[in-house]
Image: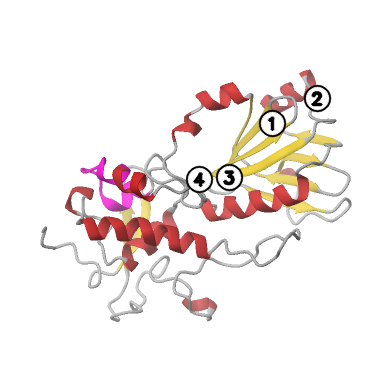
Amino acid sequence: MPEGDTIFRAARTLQRALAGQTVTRFETLLPQLQRVHDDTPITGRTIEDVSASGKWMTIRFSGDLVLLTHMLMSGSWHIYRPGERWQRPRFDMRIVIATEQFEAVAFKVPVAEFHTAASLARRQFSQLGPDVLSEEFDEQQAIANLRAEPELEIGEALLKQRVLAGIGNVYKSEVCFACRVSPFRKIATLTEEETKCLVATTRKFMASNVADNSGATIVTYTGLRRTTRRTDPGERLWVYSRRGQPCRRCGTPILSRKQGPDARVTFWCPNCQRENFTLL
């Protein structure tokens, strides 16, 4: 499922392929985008920049036009050479942005909007918390944002994009395990050390999963998230999606249950992440 690392890698790839290029073809199955294209064509515009902010991606075109997209649970962006066969069926296509050298194709993208710089600034998108993968990541602001949600369970708070932008369900469970914190405790119960651990570990885990050794080449990331640093693909995560399997630290069976109003599934070790604790 797309989390901040997925969007970051997609934006990095599209930036390398498209930035500075002229749009030669634009297609969409989304009526709200087609109306803009009919009135003020996307073809002929220059792609100025592609960037990620948390789970959002922006593609900026010349003439003060910005395409804002969110993948939610099933969307994805692919990059192809002209004439190259798509890896997904055409009926999944929602947007095509083509240049002479590449085609960027959005499949099953559920949220896509055109904006001007002014309307983008008014969008809720601008109210995101510190972007975990940004070079300007503000750790102190992230800590302050967590502390501002004292009555939320930790697992819920970590998914709030106004607190930390980019973290999703996989990293939520993995980060809580790494810091030996029960995801069902309230933020108010966190010690200063635990709070710092959650923020720092989120940054460390996500940054390690967007490490790039490809130079300036155009690549599509095909690997899997890894938090354990183990080379065996079957041992790449600590707890996520491992219900009933032994904890990699203590051997206790991993548990899972739905958490929060969105009923997102949380995985944890009941021994390593005890809910009974002493508040210092």
Q: Give the amino acid at mark 1.
A: Leu
Mark sitting on residue 52: 3
Sequence-first disc among 2 and 3: 2
Dot in front, 4 or 1:
4
Residue type marked 2: Pro
Numbered disc 3: secondary structure = strand
**Residue 148 belongs to magenta span:** yes
Question: Does 242 appear in magenta?
Answer: no
Q: How many marks?
A: 4
Looking at the image, tell me whether mark 1 or mark 2 is earlier in sequence order: 1
Q: Quadrant of the C terminus?
A: bottom left
Residue named by callout 1: 30
91 horizontally vs 187: left or right = right
How far is disc 1 from disc 2 in space, using C-alphas?
15 Å
Q: Which residue is the site of mark 4?
A: 54
Look at the picture and state if 273 lies above or below 136: below
- Report the magenta residues as a range: 145-158
Residue identified by numbered label 2: 41
- Do the CB atoms of the residues marked 4 and 1 lie less than 8 Å apart? no
Nearest-to-viewer mark from 3 and 1: 3
Quarter of the image where one finds residue 42: top right
Q: Give the alpha-carbon distance from disc 2 to disc 3, as whole Å.
A: 24 Å
User: Which secondary structure lies at badge 1?
Assistant: loop
Picture coordinates of residue 129, whole percent (x, y) = 41, 41
Mark 2 or mark 4, earlier in chain: 2
Foreground of the two, 3 or 64: 64
Q: Residue furthest top?
A: 39
Q: Measure how far apart labels 3 and 4 are at the Cα level.
A: 6 Å
154 vs 133, left or right, is left
